[in-house]
Image (spheres, grey):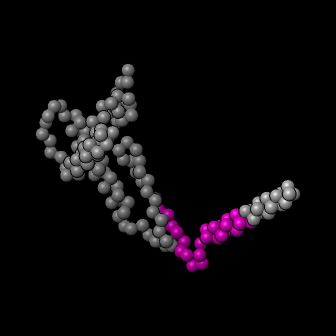
Amino acid sequence: MRRNQTRSGRWQDDAVCWCAGWLIALLLAGCGRPDGAPDLQEFSFGGPVMGTSYHIKVVLPGDGELPEGLSAGVHERLERVNALMSTYRSDSEVSRFNAAEGPVWMDCSAETVAVVAEALELGRMTDGALDITVGPLVDLWHFGSGGGDAD
């Protein structure tokens, strides 16, 4: 009886290995590029923003060209956000708002107002887990743009 169980176990092991081998072969067969598929060309660009950097990769078929103005358009849009909301720039709207002492009226762009409104709403939804007033503490512990003395 024990001898039959061993043969049965070996047969099951062989069947599992056989099935696994075929499954792997079928999966790998799907990894090839079909005949006539276009070659792909990769374009990349990036730059500095908000104390860090961004990198964008665009993959296009064959002799595709990067759309004219794409890189410049992305850079302009990120520079706009940077000018409005970066804490790494002392002249940004957010930095000027943070530097204001006491209740002061300040003109802000629609974009900044929308981001602050959304952040306040997320703060309410998360019972304060998102706190947009945490900046001074972040700076105190040297995690933000302002640095500060942690002692």
Q: Position of residue 101 (x, y in %)?
A: 18, 31
Q: Say left or right for 98 vs 30.
A: left
Res. 143 image quadrant: top left
Res. 3 image quadrant: bottom right
What residue lies at 35% left-to-right and 33% top-to-bottom? 138
Q: Position of residue 38 (x, y in %)?
A: 53, 74
Nearer to the camera, 92 or 128: 128
Is residue 118 placed above or below 26 in the rendered structure? above
Nearer to the camera, 7 or 104: 7
Q: Say left or right for 74 vs 4.
A: left
Residue that protrudes farthest toward the bottom in the picture: 36
Quadrant location of the N terminus in the rendered image: bottom right
The magenta span reads 18-43
Nearer to the camera, 46 or 134: 134
Residue that protrudes farthest toward the left in the picture: 105
* Magenta stretch encompasses residue 29: yes
Q: Position of residue 132 (x, y in %)?
A: 28, 39
What residue lies at 34% left-to-right and 28% top-to-bottom? 140
Nearer to the camera, 13 or 100: 13
Residue that protrudes farthest toward the top in the picture: 151
Q: Say left or right for 15 vs 108.
A: right
* Magenta stretch encompasses residue 90: no
Q: Position of residue 65 (x, y in %)?
A: 44, 69
Q: Can residue 63 be spotted in the picture?
A: yes
